[in-house]
Image (cartoon, rainbow, N blue to C red):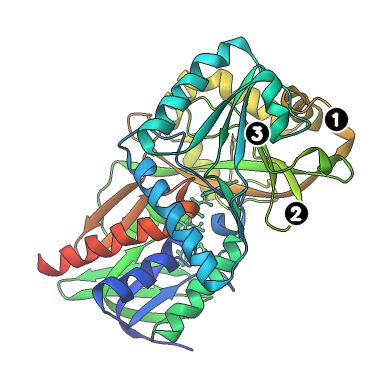
Amino acid sequence: MTRPETTVVVVGAGLVGLASARAVQQRLGISDVVVIDKEATPALHQSGRNSGVTHSGIAYAPGSGKARLAVRGRALIEDYCRERELGHRRCGKLIVATRPGELPALDELARRADANGVRIERLRDVELRRVEPHAAGLAGLHVLDTGVADFPAVARSLADELVDAGGAVLTGHEVRNVVVAHDGVRLETAGGPVRADWLINCAGLQSDRLAAMCGARTDVHIVPFRGDYLQVRPPAADLVRALIYPVPDVRWPFLGVHLTRSIGGAVHAGPTAVLSLGREAYDRRPVARDAVELLRDRALWRLARRYWRTGLAEAVRSRSTARVADELRRMVPELDATCLQPTAPGIRAQALRSDGQLVDDFAFASSPRCVHVLNAPSPAATASLAIAEVIADRLGAAFGD
Ligand SMILES: Cc1cc2nc3c(=O)[nH]c(=O)nc-3n(C[C@H](O)[C@H](O)[C@H](O)COP(=O)(O)OP(=O)(O)OC[C@H]3O[C@@H](n4cnc5c(N)ncnc54)[C@H](O)[C@@H]3O)c2cc1C
């Protein structure tokens, strides 16, 4: 179906785009909302290639958008899954400190839990096995509010709801150019032209390029970080009851290689976090345009100078199942490399500022006739319904300008 004329067009049928479209319908009373995506079905990128965890909000700086929107978004997505009978389980998560040097960071997490209103139990070494019978470590936190959800099913449900309320999802419509005028936007897409009064940019890994097409001036661009996963084969999968995480380095936006039992019951280990030479290069083959941009990226070189040790360690680990197994064995000593097999990777869209600083928080911007989501990494799947409220309110505010 084509719909060349609409009030609001949302680019990107991931969780953030679909949730934003629904929020525009519900909060602003506009039914005529079209979500367009370049792929054949929604949620083929980050929203369908993640750990499937509904994060509690424990790890994020108190007062940040990530903390606030993760806490609200988790509650919203739990309610949504319950109402729409979609897969969700609040299974709790165990964070395990395995080195003495991690104990202060565990204390900091407990402080953040308190500040962010996340329920936790502090556990001594002998108490870890009460939560995860095969876990070992020096101490831990049991995060009661964390869960797992079927995010692709949530995306499908949001798309259905959008259509039922008078909107549309157009797949196979890669946006190739945008012309912004005083009264709206005209998109040239692979499926033909689309005109809209307003545009919302939720293009994930391509969001900076879309923002540039819309004429938005921003100080950030996307750097793709690959996350490889390994599946834990049965019977070793029985060593993991729910979610087992290491203590994260809160200066770094990734949570470390963890063990997750998904909503379908499979147990995964991962994801690693290494620079990807292609924004959508799931097969590891570099994409010329992306690779050249990265090599010329001064901000990335600045980042690399500060974090080269972390980056190198991650790059080595991402190529070695044995190294990942070593990390996992610190938390679950009975696991070994023979029970791990590679499975589908994901690639994160992480925004980087021109001064070489990773953007830690969610980031949004407005330009004439457009609202942009510039940084929506984890926990944006969890927070998608809450991020959508922010986007709809921004658009609502733009109507008055
Ligand atoms: C490995 C990994 C693990 C993660 N784990 C978790 C987790 O456990 N819990 C959690 O809450 N979050 C997690 N996240 C983060 C979460 O998945 C993302 O933050 C979230 O899915 C972002 O959604 P999105 O809609 O912004 O982006 P996406 O899902 O990437 O959607 C963007 C869409 O835009 C489309 N698009 C791009 N360019 C164009 C164009 N030019 N024209 C038309 N369409 C276009 C794409 O096809 C895509 O469908 C993880 C992410 C990764 C990669």
**Residue 318: in sight, yes or no?**
yes
Looking at the image, is mark 2 or mark 1 nearer the viewer?
2
As measured in the structure, the alpha-carbon distance from the residue carrying label 2 to the one carrying label 1 is: 20 Å
Percent x, y of residue 103: 55, 15
Q: Amino acid at mark 2?
A: Gly
At horizontal 71% and vertical 43% (from top left) the residue drawn is 229
Above or below: residue 396 compared with residue 145: below
- 10 Å crowding of disc 2: few (<14), some (14-19), many (20+): few
Q: Please tell me which residue lies in front, 68 or 140.
A: 140
Q: Amino acid at mark 1?
A: Asp
Residue tagged 2: 265
Q: Please tell me which residue lies in front, 235 or 339.
A: 235
Instruction: Using residue 171 as the reference point, say whether residue 50 is left or right of it.
Output: right
In the structure shown, which secondary structural element does the residue marked by tag 2 occupy?
A: loop
Using the image, tell me which numbered label, if any, was put on residue 336: 1
Q: Please tell me which residue lies in front, 324 or 352.
A: 324
> Which badge, 2 or 1, comes first in the chain's sequence?
2
Above or below: residue 300 compared with residue 126: below
- 10 Å crowding of disc 1: few (<14), some (14-19), many (20+): some
Above or below: residue 136 compared with residue 361: above
As measured in the structure, the alpha-carbon distance from the residue carrying label 3 to the one carrying label 1 is: 15 Å
Percent x, y of residue 70: 42, 47
In which image quadrant can residue 387 be found?
A: bottom left
Percent x, y of residue 285: 68, 47
Instruction: Using residue 278 as the reference point, say whether residue 372 is left or right of it.
Output: left
Residue tagged 3: 257
**Residue 205: in sight, yes or no?**
no
